[in-house]
Image: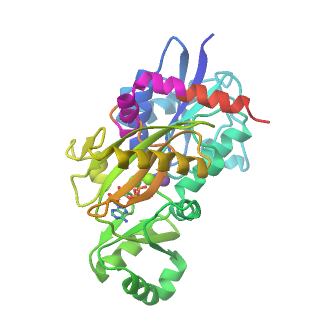
Amino acid sequence: NKINVGIIFGGKSAEHEVSLMSAASIMRAIDKEKYNVIPIGITKRGNWMMYDGPIEKIENGQWENISNKLIKDRPEENIFSVIPIGDKSLGDKIPPVLIDKIDVVFPVLHGPYGEDGTIQGLLEMADIPYVGAGVLASSLCMDKVYAKKIFEFEGLSVVDYFVIFKDELEKNIKDYISAVEKNFNYPVFIKPANLGSSVGITKAHNRDELINGLHEAAKYDRKIMVEKCIECREIECAVLGNDKPKASVVGEIIPSHEFYDYEAKYFDDGKSKMVIPADIPEEISDKIRKIAVKAYKALECSGLSRVDFFLEKGTNKIYINEINTMPGFTKYSMYPLLWQETGLPYDKLIDKLIQLALERYKQKP
Ligand code: ADP
Ligand code: MG
Ligand code: MG
Ligand code: K
C-alpha cells in the first residue's frame, strides 16, 4: 500500500517561485514505489488548486492555467472535499481542508503563509501529519526578533539589533535614526522581521540609505529590525530529526554580491558559491554543529531546519543568524547538499522527512 503524500507548493509569499523549484525537485526524486504524489498548488493570490499536469509546468508557473480547468472538471470525491471556512462568497479563495486519502503533507512553502506556522496550524486542525516544524517552531523561526530573544536566552551570540514598528517609523524616525547612529557604525542591515530569501533586506552605508531601507522593509512587515553589520563568512548547518536531531557537516556560502541578497540567491547563474564542507578548522565546525543542534532544540524544531551562522573575520567569533524551518529544497540547494555530503542522498532524505512526520504524528497525545 502506497503512502499518499500531498505536496503543497507555491503560496502567497515573495518566495513563491523558490517553492515551485523545490517542490518540482522533490516530486522528481521521491520514491514512487513507496509514495503517491498528490500535488496541491497555491497561487500568488492565495487560491488553492489541485494539479496533475507535468512537473515542468510547476517550475515555469504554467500549472496555474491547467489547474484552473482541472478544478472545474474534477468532482469532489477526488482526493479532497472542500469545506468552506467562514465567508462562502470568497469562493475558491477558501483554503480547502484536506480530508481523506492524504496520509501526510509535505508543505514545500517558504516564507510567510507557509514557513511561519499558518499552514502548520491548518494541518493540525485537519489532523494530518506533515513534514517539518510544528506551529510554534515555525512561527518563532520566521520572526527574526523572537528567534533572537530565544537564542540570547540560551546564551548564544547574536548580532546586536534594534526593533522599530511601522507606525513609530512614521512618527519618530529621527529619534530612531539617532539611536541607531549612536550605537552602530555604517553599514547596517535593515530587515523586515518576518520574511526570507533576503526579500526587503538592504545594507545601508549612510543615513539616506538607512531611511530608504526602513521604508523598503516597511513594505513587507510592520516590524522592522536594524542590525549591526558583521564582516563575516557565512556558514550553514543542516539539522534533521525530531527528539534526537543530528547536524550535518557545515557548508559555506560565498555570495556573488555585496551580501547574499535575493538576486545572488536565485538569479546569478551560479556565481554565488557553496563550499561543502566549509574550509574552516574542525574545531570551529564542531562548535557550529553543536550550537546548531542546541538552537534547533531551543526553538522546538522538528523534521528539518537549516541553521545559519556568521563567522566573524579576524576574531572567528560565531554568531547565530537564523533558523530556516523550510529551507530551499531543490537537489542543488544547500540543505540537501549538506546531507548528501554527510552520507544521506536526496531521495533518502525525502523518505526520512516523511517518516519523521509520521513518527511525530503517532507520538501525539
Ligand atoms: P533571510 O531570512 O532573508 O535569508 P538573513 O538575515 O539571512 O535573512 O539575511 C540575508 C543575508 O544578508 C545574509 O545571508 C547575509 O548575506 C546578509 N546579512 C544579514 N545580516 C547581516 C549582518 N548583520 N552582517 C552581515 N551580513 C548580513
Ligand atoms: Mg531566512
Ligand atoms: Mg538567511
Ligand atoms: K528564518
Q: Residue 250 occupies which quadrant of the picture?
A: top left
Horizontal and vertical percent position of residue 343: 40, 25
Q: Which residue lies furthest to the front in this view?
A: 283
Q: Is residue 117 visible?
A: no
In the image, is residue 190 above or below residue 272?
Answer: below
Instruction: Please tell me whether the stretch drawn in magenta is mainly helix, strand or loop.
Output: helix
In the image, is residue 273 above or below residue 224?
Answer: above
Along the line of sight, the residue nearer the viewer: 205 or 298: 298
Horizontal and vertical percent position of residue 177: 40, 85
**Residue 273 horizontal side relative to residue 104, left or right:** left
Colour setting: rainbow
The quarter of the image holding the N terminus is top right
The quarter of the image holding the C terminus is top right
Horizontal and vertical percent position of residue 301: 59, 45
**Residue 89 horizontal side relative to residue 8, left or right:** right
Q: Is residue 174 visible?
A: yes
- Read off the magenta span: 333-352
